[in-house]
Image (cartoon, rainbow, N blue to C red):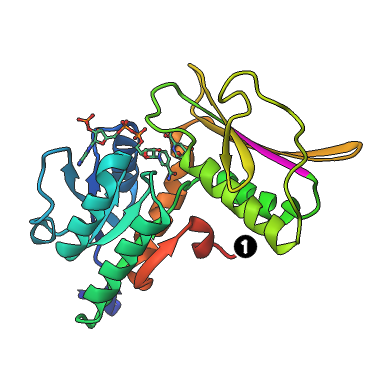
């Protein structure tokens, strides 16, 4: 924090948070650049694309690196951002328990040597509607015999199932386990591989790729004679921006690894 003299005396002026966007030319990266540039308390100090080095980002004023790249690159990027002394906010998908564990170990190792801890926030989805849909699905799962997840995205998406659908299925599976629920009922013998989708922790997950879509998910829950459908729709990538900016503003206050935007909301 810096101070400045005014007619009212000395008043505190909070310095803008310097942000570097990794994957800046992509669909999400370019939207994040616009959102950061439009925020008074943030300053876009670097646009990082494939092949660019992140080692010098602190020297140009970056304190937070935001990564929206590709699953194949993201883990290396996060380790490099940490080694460069930056906090990291990450929306890129492709995480496993193992890769999350490596990031957790790395940030904790660095923080043991620092007075101000570095933070990493990794969230499969920064849209409020999706975060709430995941939470509601986990709350509802224990009450239903059947549960399936359908994710629907634009056809340029590189991965399937979506990171959001994987997280949703794992939350549902955890809630069912905690409630002592067994397998979902399913007597179907598939005639063609994949006809019943992927199975994530016992929950079927289906991926639709369709021109015109952005990012959507339906969680279908069924009991004899009744169904609950929970649906989230991101019609525009601006839907992810309030969550991304919240994480950028909060990450320095959360040393270590935080997984999921829900951890930063008062749900
Ligand atoms: N958590 C959330 O809320 C959301 C997450 N996502 C996730 O974000 C990721 C990106 O999605 P999207 O923006 O649609 O993808 P895009 O393909 O539009 O953008 C990815 C960008 O990353 C660049 N890139 C690739 N490798 C590197 C690297 N090593 N260093 C720097 N830049 C690199 C690509 O460059 P080039 O084309 O030159 O290779 C491209 O510009 C996906 O994993 C997606 O699932 C998406 C929406 C919301
Ligand atoms: O690639 C996308 O577009 C999205 N990716 C994330 C995911 O895989 O869950 C988040 C959102 O669904 C959009």
Label 1 crowding class (10 Å Cα cut-off): few <14, some 14-19, many 20+?
few
Which residue range is magenta in the image? Answer: 146-150
Q: Is residue 149 magenta?
A: yes
Q: Is residue 179 above or below residue 25?
A: below
| Residue situated furthest right in the rendering | 225
> Which residue is drawn at the image coordinates 49% and 40% (left, top)?
239
244 left or right, relative to 233: left
175 left or right, relative to 236: right
Which quarter of the figure is the C terminus placed in?
bottom right
Residue closest to the eye, 200 or 119: 200
Residue 95 lies, in percent from the top left, at: 39, 50
Q: Is residue 218 magenta?
A: no
> Which residue is drawn at the image coordinates 24% and 46% (left, top)?
21
| Residue situated furthest top in the rendering | 211
Residue 56 lies, in percent from the top left, at: 8, 56
Q: Helix or strand or loop: what does disc 1 sit on?
A: loop
Residue 186 lies, in percent from the top left, at: 75, 35
Residue that carries the numbered disc 1 in the rendered image: 267
> Which residue is drawn at the image coordinates 18% and 42% (left, top)?
47
Q: Is residue 70 above or below residue 214?
A: below
Residue 174 lies, in percent from the top left, at: 63, 58
Q: Is residue 132 visible?
A: yes
Secondary structure, magenta segment, majority class: strand
Number of numbered discs overlaid on the protein picture: 1
């Amino acid at each position: 924090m810096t101070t400045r003299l005014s007619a009212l005396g000395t008043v505190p002026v909070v310095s803008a948070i310097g942000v570097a966007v990794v994957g800046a030319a992509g669909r999400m990266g370019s939207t994040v650049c616009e959102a950061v540039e439009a925020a008074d308390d943030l300053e876009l100090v670097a646009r990082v694309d494939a092949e660019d080095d992140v080692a010098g980002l602190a020297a140009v004023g970056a304190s937070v690196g935001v990564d929206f790249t590709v699953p194949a690159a993201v883990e290396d990027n996060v380790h490099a951002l940490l080694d460069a002394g930056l906090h990291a906010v990450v929306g890129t998908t492709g995480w496993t328990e193992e890769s999350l564990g490596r990031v957790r170990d790395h940030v904790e190792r660095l923080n043991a040597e620092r007075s101000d801890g570095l933070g990493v926030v990794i969230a499969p989805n920064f849209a409020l509607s999706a975060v709430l849909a995941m939470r509601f699905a986990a709350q509802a799962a224990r009450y239903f015999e059947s549960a399936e997840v359908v994710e629907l995205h634009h056809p340029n998406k590189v991965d399937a199932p979506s990171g959001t659908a994987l997280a949703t299925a794992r939350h549902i599976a955890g809630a069912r386990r905690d409630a002592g629920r067994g397998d979902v009922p399913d007597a179907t013998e598939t005639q063609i591989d994949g006809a019943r989708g992927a199975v994530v922790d016992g929950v079927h997950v289906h991926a639709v790729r369709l021109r015109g879509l952005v990012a959507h998910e339906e969680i279908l829950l069924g009991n004899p004679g009744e169904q609950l459908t929970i649906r989230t729709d991101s019609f525009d990538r601006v839907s992810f921006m309030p969550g991304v900016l919240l994480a950028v503003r909060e990450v320095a206050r959360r040393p270590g690894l935080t997984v999921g935007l829900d951890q930063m909301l008062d749900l």
